[in-house]
Amino acid sequence: MTADPGPADARLAAALSALQERLGGTLGVAAMPLGAHPPDAPGPVAFQERLTFPAASTIKVFVLQALLERVAHGTLTLDQELTLQADDQVTGSGVLKVLSPGRRYTLRDLATLMIVVSDNTATNLLIDLLGVDRINDVIRAHGWHDTWLAGPLQRPSSTGAPPSSRSTSSPADLADAFRRLWAGELLPAPWTQLAQAIYRRQQLTDGLGRYLPFDRYATETGASDLTLASKSGSLRGVRNDAGVVERGVHGYVVAIMTKDCPDARFHPDNLGSQVLGEVSRLIYKRFLADA
């Protein structure tokens, strides 16, 4: 994790290797302190951070970036509406799949649903609007070379092939996207603040937040100053999560990805979910436990 790792870095590397062995698959991690930090602060974490993993729903991070770039350029507005048709409704996470078709939703609401409840149907409406090629152009323009959007989610192709669920990314790309968003490097200030606010409303926090002293309701009501702004993703054998963990003026960016875990269950005690949570706890102890 550093050119000349100290004892703490060596212990963390050994712990991550042990967790990968427990996973029975492949683990990748990228993490770094957020913003200005003292010279003696712990350095970045990089464990197989450039390996490519199935992105699952973490690809929605890049769909949101492409959408807000179009809004910032004035070619779209967040008040524009799209109509939900019955054939737009797809399986997987989200709520639009069970709501009445024929209703109209603003781009703002679709973007919020895409992130905070990982709504696949909302995501596809935005992908159809923006275009797969345009979204991939945005990804390449920002140098996220491990990331690629395969197409709409959970939608069978016209040839009868399985739904395109194999978009890819890496811990390095996801961590870089969150780091640069929080640094204000990706979007003008109003859209940066909007994106951050959407991620902070995340309701699927049992990945990064699983073993942290994080209580979403306490944060919402102001009883806790520990915040989690993130985007997770799951497929069979895959558990990913990435985002920003903050307490007051301190914080860090983290991206954790897994693949090939033999536990294929969609269940709270899925082995991949447990390992991801254990990694998140190690990263929290490194950067925030004493803050």
Image (spheres, rainbow, N blue to C red):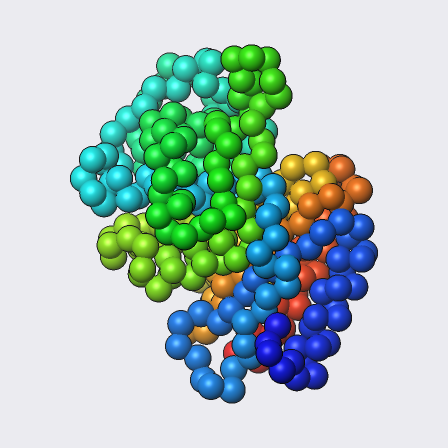
Residue at x 45% of width, y 18% of height: 88
Residue 268 can be seen, yes or no = no
> How far across and how far down the image is residue 153, in percent?
52, 28
119 in relation to 284, above or below: above
Q: Is residue 216 above or below residue 224?
A: above
Say whether residue 155 is left or right of residue 82.
right
Image-based side of 136 in relation to 30, left or right? left
At x 67%, y 62%, the residue is 279
- Compared across the picture, whether 175 is left or right of 14 comes to left
Query: Where is residue 117 shown, x and y percent of the image?
Result: 51, 39
**Residue 264, image x and y in percent?**
76, 37
Q: Work out whether 162 lies above or below 184.
A: above
- Residue 182's x, y, as percent? 38, 61
Residue 28 appearing in the image: yes
Q: Quadrant of residue 284?
A: bottom right
Q: Nearer the viewer, residue 220 or 243?
A: 243
Name the residue furthest left.
74
Query: Could you tell me which residue is drawn at 61 percent across and 72 percent down?
Result: 1
Number of on-image labels: 0
Q: In front: 261, or 143?
A: 143
Q: Residue furthest bottom?
A: 40
Above or below, 267 against 208 in this view is above
**Residue at the spot 70% in from the left edge and 36% down from the top edge:** 236
